[in-house]
Image (spheres, rainbow, N blue to C red):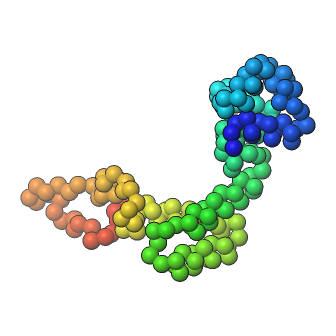
């Protein structure tokens, strides 16, 4: 939806016309006409001003439907969980749809706190290189490598290297 469409919708919800909203926020009527005719978006200062007026967020005014109500955290969290579930469902790179369906069923069987925890754990797994899919962009190599060993004879050689596939300290 365009900025003007969102602006107009918020005006209806508040019970004011776009002209009244503009007047109450010291915005010229010609500016409002430009939003409507050209499909333009206000500058950041005006977005913040209108967000305060409509009790919403600048991100919502700029087109993010998940950011409408900054005061209703449960609504935002549920929208995020729904978004994550949709992304899982839409994934086409999984080896078998059976695995995808099992994951979605398990995710949907959790309460909201469990769903939040599941998302966190999946995010944690993506940070461990041995679990990362080949098509996923890798972190810089030094982020997951053990510190370099001193190969000088007699120094640093008594510490065995990490086994194949094992992560360094803190992983």
Numbered disc total: 0
Q: Position of residue 15 (x, y in %)?
A: 91, 37
Outermost left residue: 153
Residue ID at (54%, 75%): 100
Q: Position of residue 59 (x, y in %)?
A: 66, 40
Q: Nearer the viewer, residue 114 or 82?
A: 82
Q: Residue 20, relative to residue 92: is it above or below?
A: above
Residue 74 seen from this side: yes
Q: Nearer the viewer, residue 158 or 124?
A: 124
Residue 163 lies in quadrant: bottom left
Residue 171 seen from this side: no
Q: Residue 62, relative to residue 95: is it above or below?
A: above
Residue ID at (69%, 44%): 1
Q: Position of residue 11 (x, y in %)?
A: 84, 36
Q: Where's the C terminus, which quadrant? A: bottom left
Residue ID at (10%, 60%): 154
Outermost front residue: 37
Q: Is residue 168 left or right of residue 109?
A: left
Residue 23 lies in quadrant: top right
Q: Is residue 127 left or right of residue 147?
A: right
Q: Nearer the viewer, residue 114 or 137?
A: 137
Outermost right residue: 15
Q: Is residue 32 left or right of residue 143?
A: right
Residue 121 lies in quadrant: bottom right
Q: Position of residue 131 (x, y in %)?
A: 40, 68
Q: Nearer the viewer, residue 92 or 121?
A: 92
Residue ID at (75%, 39%): 5
């Amino acid at each position: 939806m365009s900025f003007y469409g969102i602006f107009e919708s918020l005006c209806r919800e508040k019970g004011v016309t776009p002209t009244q909203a503009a007047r109450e926020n010291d915005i010229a009527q010609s500016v409002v006409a430009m939003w409507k005719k050209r499909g333009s978006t206000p500058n950041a200062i005006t977005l913040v001003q209108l967000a305060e007026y409509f009790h919403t967020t600048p991100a919502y005014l700029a087109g993010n439907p998940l950011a409408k109500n900054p005061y209703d955290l449960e609504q935002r969290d549920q929208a995020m969980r729904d978004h994550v579930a949709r992304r899982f469902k839409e994934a086409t790179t999984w080896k078998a749809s059976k695995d995808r369906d099992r994951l979605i069923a398990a995710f949907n069987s959790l309460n909201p706190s469990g769903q939040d925890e599941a998302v966190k754990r999946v995010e944690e797994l993506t940070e461990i290189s041995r679990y990362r899919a080949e098509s996923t962009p890798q972190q810089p190599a030094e982020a997951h490598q053990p510190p370099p060993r001193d190969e000088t004879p007699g120094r640093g050689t008594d510490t065995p290297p990490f086994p194949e596939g094992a992560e360094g300290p803190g992983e």
